[in-house]
Image (spheres, coloured by chain):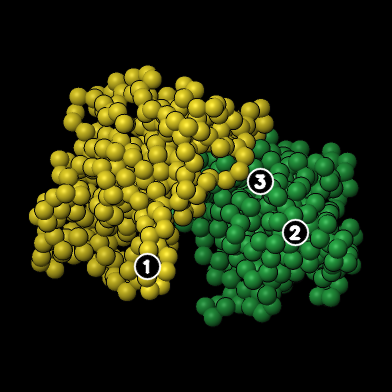
Chain colours: A yellow, B green
Amino acid sequence: MIAVQAPSTEDAMQTSQPLVKVRDLRKHFPVRRGLIIERQIGSVKAVDGITFDIAKGETLGLVGESGCGKTTAGRTILGLYPATSGQALIDGIDVHHSNREAIKMLRRKAQMIFQDPYASLNPRWTVAGIIGEPLRVHNILPDPQARAERVKELMLRVGLSPQLINRFPHEFSGGQRQRIGVARALASNPSFIVCDEPISALDVSIQAQVVNLLEDLQDEFGLTYLFIAHDLSMVRHICDRVAVMYLGVIVELAERDELYEHPLHPYTQALLSAVPIPDPKKDRSRQRIILAGDVPSPLNPPPGCRFHPRCPIAMDQCSRIQPEWREVAPGHWVACHAV
Amino acid sequence: MNRRQVILDLKDLRTRFHIAEGTVYAVNGVSLTLHECETIAIVGESGCGKSVTMLSVMGLIPVPPGEIVSGQAFYRGRDLLALSEAEMEHIRGKELAMVFQDPMTALNPVLTIGRQISEPLRVHLNMDHATAQQRVIELLEQVGIPDPKNRMNDYPHQFSGGMRQRAMLAMALACAPSVLIADEPTTALDVTIQAQIIELVTRLRDALCMAVIWITHDLGVVAGLAERVIVMYAGLVVEEASVDELYDDPRHPYTLALLAALPRIDRRRDRRLKSIPGAPPNLLVMPHGCPFAPRCEFVFDRCRAETPPLLPVAIEHRARCWYDVVNGKPFE
């Protein structure tokens, strides 16, 4: 149903094998009702068939509004949620259908940075324990002394003073905590990191610090990122390619500047036009597409194209037929009847 | 230049909080003016005192732990800070109304939306039940809630985030206030919903000739909305200018740094983001000298010794800095 997509763009990346392959991945959450006799009354189709590749060393942005399934997508790709159907491969390892040994290897290779630097660090553990945990559970550095040395090295690398190794999370500011989260993700020498809104909880002046750190680390260690965010300006800044999600499906995927300069899907166009520009004259002269209403419930997504009830150019067939996911220009994929 | 009448005149406001760890110097001498039908924005990062400033004006600071140490807030000539709570109750919600960031916590979960919107109507305008109901339906219609007759009987949890914020707006607008204070009303919302709310506020502002104070950390939102911008840092106004001038010709190093730290959706990437080193100051210590000095790239000796005053740098443009960023040398 959904075409398998070739790795993107004319970049040098094209020659390299994709590190991450996602094929028609679905994640549905059952909705149950009843206390004693529980029965399933439906399912939330959080991710409903997404397909893309991420090349080695590339940053793919996954954007969309709250509830579009972008976080669920990231977690399902890492195997934190079992998939309902479909496939995710990271460096050749099938995330959902491999033996324990392979999954353990995968856990070293693929890491995650979370949105909330307050909730994602155990308040009762010191920094040494938090950053050192991957080194301990994977038996990378069983010796506590050597582990502490490595933790200090990691702290220095992410811009934290190694002297703070025995402090607790509450003694750090939001930006510093996010650095702890980054150091923890780096500890096991991963090749792939899912960054789930890593900067949205931070102040503007701190966001740039963390973004620059992530970029430096990518250059230094050749990391591949899946960058999940709703801040479209930041995504344009740091991603090589961008995928736009709406109600569990990807509606458009293209190389960064292509997507921002020639958006084809009406949802992408509306989304981009809604982002305010920090330039009063330019902002005033801009034509804004104001979408009516809210995002429908993923429990009962609209038939046909999921965007059709809010789409300014919806046609008759949009409410009946799900649009095909196709490549309309090299590396530019879109699912829309009107394109 | 501004011929419209001043409606709100805030003078040297200082607000502190006495907590177990010591005293938080939240607002350290803020003065600002607001004209009739004007929209101003107060911009700053978390903890800069932007919300506390307006909460102080509205008489919504809990005392203790809060304390308004000094200042006056003249609304049409009356000092709001000198009024008793009973007198303030006649003004709050009627003349000055406020919309908050998180509509879920600002709305009462056990009362229907209609009941909550009708409250100011009954309290301030002495409307009877039937008239108030009718007005609620009009208000909900005005803010774009579909099927208001039925939806007014819903509870807040039955509304989406964007609809709750619309309901909050309907409540704030119920008595046709002269001043609307919007405290990060779109921060918790998605961009497409944010665009809807901004469009709505601008439309209502123009229709009702309402003065608006928009509190935000987002320099993008401000650009399309405000006429004048006030930038705050560590409880102080550090720069004040018309919106065009602030973006074209920023004079305070903090404003410059904030704009340089912002990625642009309308441009191709041409450089790394310029980050501001360090973190915002700890307000448990009264800042000595310029509060931005430890993070400033133009810092020199005087900055650490003396807090600069808010100096005029151009017409209707003031900045709190000892350094002339245009000529690349200290003033004088």
Vertical order, A41 against B63 (above or below)? above
Q: CA distance from mark 2 to mark 3?
A: 14 Å
Residue position marked by numbered label 2 in the rendering:
B171
The residue marked by circle 1 belongs to what chain? A
Any part of residue A51 in sight: yes
Q: CA distance from mark 1 to mark 3?
A: 41 Å
Any part of residue B8 in sight: no
Residue B135 is left or right of residue B19, and the answer is right
Discs 2 and 3 share one subunit: yes
Whichever of callouts 2 and 3 sits on the residue coming sooner in the sequence is: 2
The residue marked by circle 2 belongs to what chain? B
The 10 Å Cα crowd at callout 1, few under 14, some 14 to 19, many 20 or more, is few
Q: Position of residue A49 (x, y in %)?
A: 33, 40
Q: Position of residue A52 (x, y in %)?
A: 30, 34
Q: Quarter-wise, where is residue A118 in the image? A: bottom left
1 or 2: mark nearer the eye: 1
* Marks 1 & 2, CB-CB < 8 Å contact: no
Amino acid tagged 2? Met
Residue position marked by numbered label 3 in the rendering:
B197
Q: Quarter-wise, where is residue A2 in the image? A: top left
* Count of marks, rendered view: 3
Q: Quarter-wise, where is residue B253 in the image? A: top right
Amino acid tagged 3? Ile
Discs 1 and 2 share one subunit: no
Amino acid tagged 1? Glu
Give the residue drawn at x 29%, y 42%. A25
The residue marked by circle 3 belongs to what chain? B
Residue position marked by numbered label 1 in the rendering:
A38
Q: CA distance from mark 1 to mark 2?
A: 41 Å
